[in-house]
Image (cartoon, helix red, strand yellow):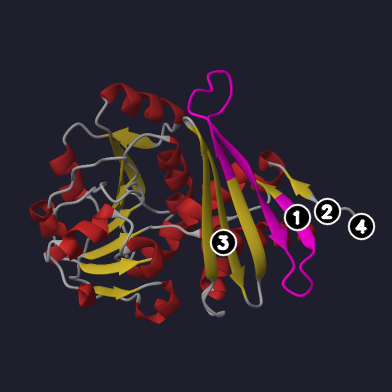
Amino acid sequence: MSTPVIPFDQGDALLDWLGLTKALAEGHTLPKAEIGDTFLYRDLDTLLSRAAWINGLGMAVKTATIFPQNTDKPAINGGVSLYSDSDGTLEAIIDFHLVTKWKTAGDSLLAALRLAPDNPRRILIVGAGTVAGTVRAAFGAGFPDATFSLWNRSPARADAFAKAHPDVTVENDLETAVQAADIIVGCTMATSPWLRGDWLRPGQHVNLIGAYRPDMREVDDATLLKSRIFVDSFDTTVGHIGEIKIPLEEGTIARDKLLADYYDLASFTSEADDITFFKNGGGAHLDLMTSRYILDRWKAQ
């Protein structure tokens, strides 16, 4: 039997967001993943490979080629190779963008389903890039009765997003939008905070996807100090992402302020008046869990 190659469109049509969050939760009941990253460079171009092995789930190597000078084709390409845990054979090759799309938003949705207030009415998305559209789809599946609004630094991009998503309302004032929202999802590439803690009220959930480098932050210290903080993985956030790394190094928060990651999913709880904060750090182990879910759905069709 030939190894399946799963392209974006055909794979995308088979998946559902709540099914993925269940698969991610189940993946974290298995032994902790072994993870390794490699980087190769040629001038401005990069070859990045992220590998993970989870006993009982298998192995995955997610490879990305990053060619920033591409003009007539995407700057980022790649694929995921998924291997059997029992004999190491190649089980599938999956489109890079398919895995990344579902892993990224599914990761944040799992936390929101555990930490957000019951029956949230308003969800605010900050940022108007590709991830924002995926967040609209994922959180719409998780919270079907909520309404969505969006704020973006560039009004023109916000308006373009609203044209593509007519059920999303564009917000003009960020502070007012934050105060009205039950869930705030950050999808920006900000290096300085756009969210201020003194805007927040009890019962809100802040869920951050955007910052991924040591110099990037989407929220200020006050947000962290008044929140119950959770992350998807201590290994991929604590020493790597500015959102967590900077306030820890500056002594703004102590390490025990980080209450749990997904390997302690039972601790992802909240009371009605809590402000909860989740930082999405990603990681190859989540790519592996997502890839296994995609292959299972592919086989089931």
Between marks 3 and 2, how big is the CA–CA gap? 23 Å
Mark 2: few/some/many CA within 10 Å (<14, 14-19, 20+): few
Element at badge 2?
loop
Q: Secondary structure at mark 1?
A: strand
Q: Quadrant of residue 96?
A: top right
Q: Quadrant of residue 301?
A: bottom right
Three-letter residue code for mark 2: Thr
Who's the residue at 30% across and 38% down the image? Answer: 150
Q: Which residue is mark 1?
A: 92
| Location of residue 230 in the rendering, given as x and y in whole percent from the top left corner | 31, 68
In the picture of the structure, the residue carrying the numbered disc 3 is: 20
- The picture places residue 255, in percent across and down from the top left corner, at 22, 73
- Give the distance between the C-alpha atoms of the residues marked 4 and 3, in whole angstroms: 26 Å
Q: Earlier in the sequence, mark 4 or mark 1?
A: 4
3 vs 2, front mark: 2
Residue 107 shown left or right of residue 151 in the figure: right
Is residue 88 highlighted in magenta? yes
Tell me if label 4 and label 2 are in contact, CB under 8 Å.
no
The residue indicated by pointer 4 is 1
Please indicate whether residue 269 sits to the left or right of residue 171 in the image.
Answer: right
Residue at left 63%, top 56%?
61
Disc 1 versus disc 3: nearer the observer: 1
> Which residue: 38% across, 72% down?
261
Residue for badge 2: 3
12 vs 109, left or right, is right
* Residue at horizontal 53 percent and vertical 66 percent from the top: 35
Q: Which label's residue is closer to the chain start, 4 or 3?
A: 4
